[in-house]
Structure formats: C-alpha cells, structure tokens
Image (tube, rainbow, N blue to C red):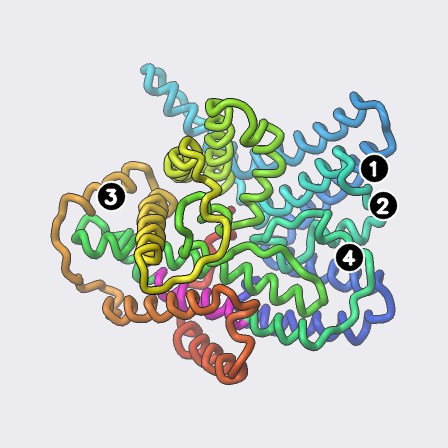
Amino acid sequence: MFFNSLKFAVFLPIVFIFYWFFSNKSKKNQNLILILASYYFYSCWDWRFLFLLIFSTFLDYYTAIKIEENEKKSIRKFWLWLSISINLGLLAVFKYYDFFAVSATEFISGFGFHVEPVLLKLILPVGISFYTFHGLSYIIDVYYKRIKTEKNFVDYSLFVSYFPLLVAGPIERATHLLPQLKVKREFDFEKAKEGIYQIVWGLVKKVVIADTCALYANEIFDNYTTMNSMSLILGAVYFAFQIYGDFSGYSDIALGTSKLFGIDLLKNFDYPYFSRDIAEFWRRWHISLSSWFRDYVYIPLGGSKGSKLFQLRNVMVIFLLSGFWHGANWTFIVWGLLNAVYFIPLLLLNKNRNNMGEFRLSFNLNSLKIISNIAFTFAITCLAWIFFRANTIHQAVDYIYRIFTNHIFSFQYLHIGRSVEKLIVFLVIFSIIEWNNRNKIEPISGKYSWIKLALAITAILTLGIFSDYKNFIYFQF
C-alpha cells in the first residue's frame, strides 16, 4: 500500500475515524487500533512477511526482559548479542546472501576456478532494514540502561510496527516514541491540521517533483551512451531532485500522518541541498539513519576521540556501513566510500563542525562564499548520486567519463516527449519555495495557508495523478 495510492486515501480516514471515535476511551484501545491498522498495512505488501515482523517483535521484547532482569554482565551480554545476531542474521539472509554468494564466486573465478553460486533468490521483505534498526536501538538502549524495558507487549509491538514509519522510516528511538505510546492521546485540531498540511506537501514532493524528475532521469540513465554532456549533467541533477522529493516526501507524509494520531516522529530531512559542506549535508539528510550510526556505531568505536588515524577509521566504517545498509550492490558501497572521501578533508582540517548554525544571505562577499559552498556541495553530491543510481560501477564510471569528454552542451530531444526547459524552470521554482520555507514549521502553514493548500492539491491532481512512476525509492532498502 503506497502513501500516494487511492487505497491509502481510503485506508487513512477509516483508521482515523476508528482511532478517535471508537477507541478514545483508553490508551490501550488506541494502541490496539493502530497495531491492527499497522499489521493490515504491512500485510498488503506480502502477508507472509507479517510473521517475520511479529517474530522480530517477540524476539526483542523477550531478550530485553532477560537483559534487564539479570545483573550479571556476561548474561546480559549473551542476550544482547543473541538479539543482535538473529536480527542481523535475518537481514543478511534476505538482503545480502545472494550478493555475497555472487561476489565470492566472481572472486574465486578470478583464480581460474569455475564455481556455480547457490542463490536463495528471496524476496526482500519491505521495511526490514527499518524495523530491524528500530528493534536494535531498543535492545541496545535497554542494555546500557538508557531506558526501562517495556513490559506491555501491546505498546512495544506498536513501537516496532507503527505503520507511518514501518516501511521507510524515519528510524525511531524507543526513548522518543515509546513514552508517547504509554499515554492516552487527546485530539488536537491544530496538530491534525498541521499534519494534513505536511501530508499534502509530502505528496507535492513525491508525485509532482520526484515522479516528474524520475521520467527524465530514467530516460537519461537508460540511454546515457547516446546523451551529450549537458543531458548527462541534467540526468544527475534530476535524480538528485528525484531521490530528495521521493524520500523527504515519504518522510513528510509519515510525520504528517502520525500527527493525525497525536504522535510526533523524528524529523528526517532539514533542507540538505542548502548545506555548505558535506558534513552539514549529512546532518540534514536522512537524519534518523545518520544519528543511528553515530550513536550506536561511531561513538562506541571511539567517535572523534583519539588520534586522527582512529577518527579516519571510524568515519570510513560509518560511511561504508551507510552505503552497505542501502543495498546489496557495490555501487552503494562506492557511493558511501565517495562520501567518506568528501568528508575526510574536513575532519583532517577540523572543519567538519564549522557550519552548524543557520545563516542569512545579503549583498556581500561572505554571502557569495556561502552560495559558492552550497553550489559545490550540491555538485559533488550529484556526482556521488550517479553511483547510487547506476546499475553497476562500470556504468557509473562510464557515465561520469562521458560528462567530461563529450563537450556538447545543448538540450537534447528525449523520447518521453517532455520539454527539458520547462522542467528546469519547474525545479528552480521548487528550489525557491524550499529556500523560503527553511525557517518555517510547515511549508503550507502561515499566511494564505488555504490558498497554498489549494494550489498544492491542484498541482498534485494535475501533474501527479497520471504519473506512471508510483514506487518510493527507499522501499527497496
């Protein structure tokens, strides 16, 4: 069930009505309604994988109790690593087994031996990377006594399976979400209105921006050998807007949907393409994943303490894990490695925390420097996105090589029959709106909110409803 589908448009109001009108007497009833809705939502993808979600929920619920009730460190550590091993083991089997099998076979073949890989060819359970990380954060927090074990199985089940974030995040923390699930929620009209605005803006990003850019990006990447330098550059830019509109749009819809039920989720995007360096970009892009790796991997490894050599090791580990988390393909690993290469000079020069605060532009040299830094950061980000989008490393390298060797900078005809110039103007307008919205709570709220809401819905209906591209990119992760 997609957020941008008619099925979800019917599903959400039904859940909303049952939640507020038939279960408003107690917190337990509210949570039960949301669990049933979440399980139905997930089973719409493939009901068989619902049992995997339930198993993961039981596993972490039980192991957390065993960790808390034992004071002996060795026993606590046993239950911790049992949970981690099973969770990551399931993730490895479904997501990475075939990748490792093929890679090992190709490596052995390099020595002249012929081996046929044994492949499982399993369907990847949707959202497994996200709900696995939800459970792991809970188990680790219980182990380090940052949070008490949740004895109420209904409340814990909802934490793991809550449908707005189940499929593609944000990756929630038990310390943030569970306390909200422990109390009865009261209907707040202003919060619900805010949620509707955020849902609509998320749909604008998805069906208007991302899906439109996808048509152009797919055409260029699928036929990149016939494209000139200008088209190849535009293809990378289109994909950059596609993945931003797609994923941040999903996050907006998730956060907005959750507000309808009186629950706040973690912010996942903070206008990352206006970052002044790559370190700031990663503080603003997929915030829940970046902070997860920071808190549960980077800091335990030593973080920024110790020698520069140890700091470099920790940074490389984090970025390679981030790439590997996204998918079982060498292109994702190279994408992560490339971002590490971007980040390392800032670390070595102690400039990785230079751009922490907000900024304003005016007519002076400092503003010109800021604009130049934003443009450079966006350019190298687009370069890295080429590896993320390409099917193979060879294709990505060849794509980049053709950008720098073709030397033809003119608009080409695309077989999708759309005007390139119009899309560029469209993206410029969208970027101006995004820039203007940086310091606002919600893009549509404020002055003339009803007019902005009407314009947004009109754009969704006129530009998005006939789109052939419906999937969300991050569903594959």
Q: Earlier in the sequence, mark 1 or mark 2?
A: 1
Give the amino acid at mark 2: Lys
- Mark 2 and mark 1 in contact (Cβ < 8 Å)? yes
Q: CA distance from mark 1 to mark 4?
A: 19 Å
Q: Which residue is mark 2?
A: 151
Please tell me which residue is depicted at 42% across the width and 70% down the height of the picture. 433
Q: CA distance from mark 3 to mark 4?
A: 48 Å
Please tell me which residue is depicted at 42% across the width and 52% down the height of the picture. 275
87 in relation to 446, above or below: above
Give the amino acid at mark 3: Ile
Q: Which residue is mark 3?
A: 400
Report the residue that reaches farthest toward the front: 364
Q: Earlier in the sequence, mark 3 or mark 4?
A: 4
What's the magenta region? Answer: 200-214
Q: Earlier in the sequence, mark 4 or mark 2?
A: 2
Mark 4 falls on what kind of element? helix
Q: Which residue is mark 4?
A: 181
Please tell me which residue is depicted at 34% across the width and 50% down the height of the picture. 373
Residue 94: image location, x then y, percent: 56, 38
Give the amino acid at mark 4: Leu
- Mark 4 and mark 3 in contact (Cβ < 8 Å)? no
Residue 216: image location, x then y, percent: 30, 61
